[in-house]
Structures are given as C-alpha cells and as structure tokens.
Image (cartoon, grey):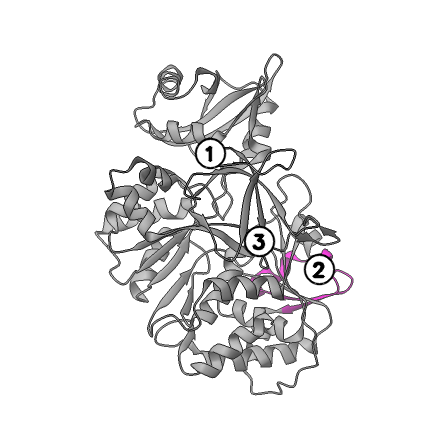
Amino acid sequence: MHTALLLDMAADAAPDRLALGGRADGLTFDETRRRARAGAAWLAGQGDGTVAFLGLNGPALPIAVFAAGLLGRPFAPLNYRLPNADLNRLLARTAPSVAIVDDDMLGRLEPHAGVTVVARSAFEAACASPGSDDLPDAQPDIAVLLFTSGTTGEPKAAILRHANLTSYVISTVEFLGAEEGEAALVSVPPYHIAGISAVLTGVYGGRRIVYLEAFTAEDWVEAAAREEISHAMVVPTMLGAILDILEARGESLPALKALSYGGGRMPLPVIERALAMLPHVDFVNAYGLTETSSTIAVLGPDDHRMAIYSDDEAAQRRLGSVGRPLPSLELEIRDPEGRVLGPNQPGEIYVRGEQVSGEYAHKKMLCDDGWFATNDGGWLDEEGYLFVEGRLDDVIVRGGENMSPGEIEDVLRAHPGVADVAVLGVPDDHWGEKVAAVVVARDPAPSPEDLAAWVRARLRSTKTPEVWAFREALPYNDTGKLLRRQLKAEMTAKPAAA
C-alpha cells in the first residue's frame, strides 16, 4: 500500500466532504484528488527524481505529497529557516529532483546540477487546471526523505517508505472516523515528521486540514476560533504562548475537542495550567521520532485527568510520562550490553514494528531482528508507562554517575522564580563533567544559592548544579526542541559565571 491510496479511499468514500482549507472556500476530497493527479502529471513533465518542497504551510503541501506518491517519487521537504549556504547544500543532495519553491524564496537558491526549480505559483496553477492527468506507471517505494536537524554534523536524510507511513496511519486512525465539520489546525512546519503525519492522518480520518503558514500564538488562537477547530497538535513552546493569549482574551475555544503535544519535553506547570484552563479538551502526549514514522507512545486524555483529579501518586507521576507504547509496536528498555531491563530501570529505548524505518540514505540502522535503537534514554514503570529522559548524548556523567538533565530541570521549574531552565554537563578536570544550569528567571530573580538549596533539598547533592548562568530566553528550534548542544558549546567556549 502507498500513501496516495489513502487519498483515493477518502475521495471515493466521501468525495464532497471538505478536506483542505477554510469552511467557506476549502477543497473537497474529490477536488484534492483531482489536483494531486493534475499536479503529478505536470511534475512528470518538469523533470525526474525526488519532489523537493521549499515553502510555508498551505494546501500546496498535501497536494505535493500525494502528487509525489502518485509518481512513485520521494517527497523531500526542506527547512526554509536554514542559512542559504546550508539550504543549497541540502537542495543539491536531492538531485535528481524537481523542487517546488515558494515564489519569494526563489532568490535564495543557486543553480544545481540535476535540480529543476519550479515556482509554487506555477505548480498551484497546474494543479487547478483541467489538463491531462495521465500518469506514468509507478512502483512506489520511498515515500518521504526528511533531513535531520544536523545539530551534531551534516544533516542525515531519514528514509520513510510507503509501508512505514501507511502502517502507522492505518494502525492509529479510524478510516473516516472524524465527524462532519471537524477540522485540524496544523502549525508545525512541513519539514517535520509531524507535518507529514498530519497530512496522512487527516486525510485518512476524513478531517479537514487548516494550515497556519507560520506559527504565532495570536494567529493560532484567531484561526482556531474562526475555523471552529476541533483538533490540533502543538509543541511545548507553542502551548505556553497559546495559553497566555487565551487567558488575556478570556477565550476558551469551545469547539476544540482534542489537543496533542510532543516534539520536546513538556514542562509540568504548562500542561497542568492547560488542563485547568481547558477542562473540555482531551489532551494527548505523543512521543515519536522521524525514524519511526511519528508516534510510538501515547499518554491519553483519561491519564491526563487522572493525574489531576486522582489522589493516586502513581497516576499523578504519569503526567510526566509519554504514556504507553502503541499496540502495533514492541518497545523495550536495554542496557549498554543490549540486555532487556525490567520496570523502573533506566536504559536506552528500543522499538520494533512495521512503521519503524530506522533507515538513512545509504545506511540501515535496524538490528538484524528489526529492533531500532532510538538513542533516547528512558524507563518503563510497572504498568508499562514510558518515561523519556532525553537523548543519551545529553546525559551528564559526573564521576561515573549518569544524571538525566530532565530530572533536574523539572525540580528547578517548580521553583517560583524560574520561568525556564536548561541543565547540561560541562567539562570538569576532577569529575569529568559537572552540572550546569542556564536559567530564565522571573522577577524577582532568585540567586544561585537559593536555587542550589532548592535542588539540594529535593535531589542528591551530586545533582545540584555547580555552574549557574542567567539568560532572557533559551534557544529552541521551531519544533520545540531545546538546542542543548548549542548552549553547551556556548558555555564551554568561555568561563561561565558561577
């Protein structure tokens, strides 16, 4: 099965249901299919190879995704926020390719051998024209190429095949399970796995997709109210800003039914505030990776409410988890020697299932038996709830003791004077690494001594930061991930204030 069949199924079963855009002027599923076929026929005449995409969110994105699928070509969305030099290096790596580019981004690109650049306006015009939709025979294999963030070197091209993506969609979404009138607001960028999965799950579920070109909390709230949005996905940094706008405006978004979040660690005070402000909304924490075709574990609405309203300490603690693994997957925690660990024992998260790709260009990362090592640390409790501690590369090793930055960050975020915090290891001649904390303080700002005493009273003294720095804001990427390595490079480039 390939991704374009998801659109075919929806268009055959509900041709007149709205699929993309606003309530007043959106495209139906049948119109979306016709545009994808026209777009595929036009792209076939422009050149061979991958269909690259450089641009903001909008209806052209899902149409291009399905057009590429109809041609049996990989779809490769590119990060438009990259500097021009980095962006052009990625574009060159897609060759041979046809690149659909927002008109106002065309000037950023250099000529590259094997790359044909077409303006987004030309692609959209071709999709809307009643021309031929005769398509060449295709043997779909690779569906999507997603370039990693490249925080530790040149970005890697993660390969997701049609079987990976359709397995994820079919195992997690009920076909046409959405009610008439439901709409999903998508504000994550096209080049993130959440942006791709939003296209496929929205179409298969029969839910209208509404796009924000680029996220601001004000635009998000206005679009959610105007379009009577029922479902949305946000990253942690988005949710806090959205709550601020809702509170300032006295808005509750009564049409909103479900809000999922993921992409980074959610501060407990933010989700607790969201549950209090929006009691009518079902909250879902979704944990996944690019290499796993999106979500592999879910903390559902009932778990969120139990954490708030139950006196059960275990239920309360699970608000800090990412929930249970999907039934269609296997998940294990293993030690560095590959031994499977029991409940409450931290190690590396391994996952296996049809949706798991674990593949990069020219390199397969799956074990011989199909297991994928995520490089994320975590542990399972007695009931099978998964707690993610972060990337193993970020673990602080002090005198042979492994420390999770997330555990220390959670303690510091509970301090009334801390608005945000990042914890990391910096070099130390005696211990190997020592714990450093970069704090965004509220007014009045707490002192390092006050914060150290706060941590020491709640964790072992060895986990108390020895180096403190204060900033107005922390660096995050546009999918809500803390750029911890950037902070570490800055902290180690010159002596930090203690």
Magenta-span inclusion, residue 107: yes
Q: How many marks?
A: 3
Can residue 269 be seen at all in this image of the molecule?
Answer: no
The label shown at residue 94 is 2
Indicate left or right for 291 with 228 as reference. Answer: right
Alpha carbon distance from label 2 to label 3: 22 Å
The label shown at residue 344 is 1
Of labels 1 and 3, earlier in sequence is 3
Q: Position of residue 450 (x, y in %)?
A: 35, 17
> Does 257 appear above or below 470?
below
| Residue interval drawn in magenta | 92-118
In the foreground, 132 or 65: 65
Residue at (47%, 65%) from the top-left corner?
Answer: 201
Dot 2: few (<14), some (14–19), or many (≥20) neighbours within 10 Å? many
Query: Nearer the viewer's eye, disc 2 or disc 1?
Result: 1
Residue at (62%, 71%) from the top-left corner?
Answer: 69
Q: Which residue is mark 3?
A: 292
Check the picture and name the quadrant holding the N terminus. Answer: bottom right
Of labels 2 and 1, earlier in sequence is 2
Q: Position of residue 215 (x, y in %)?
A: 43, 54
Query: Nearer the viewer's eye, disc 2 or disc 3?
Result: 3
| Amino acid tagged 1 | Asn
| Amino acid tagged 2 | Thr
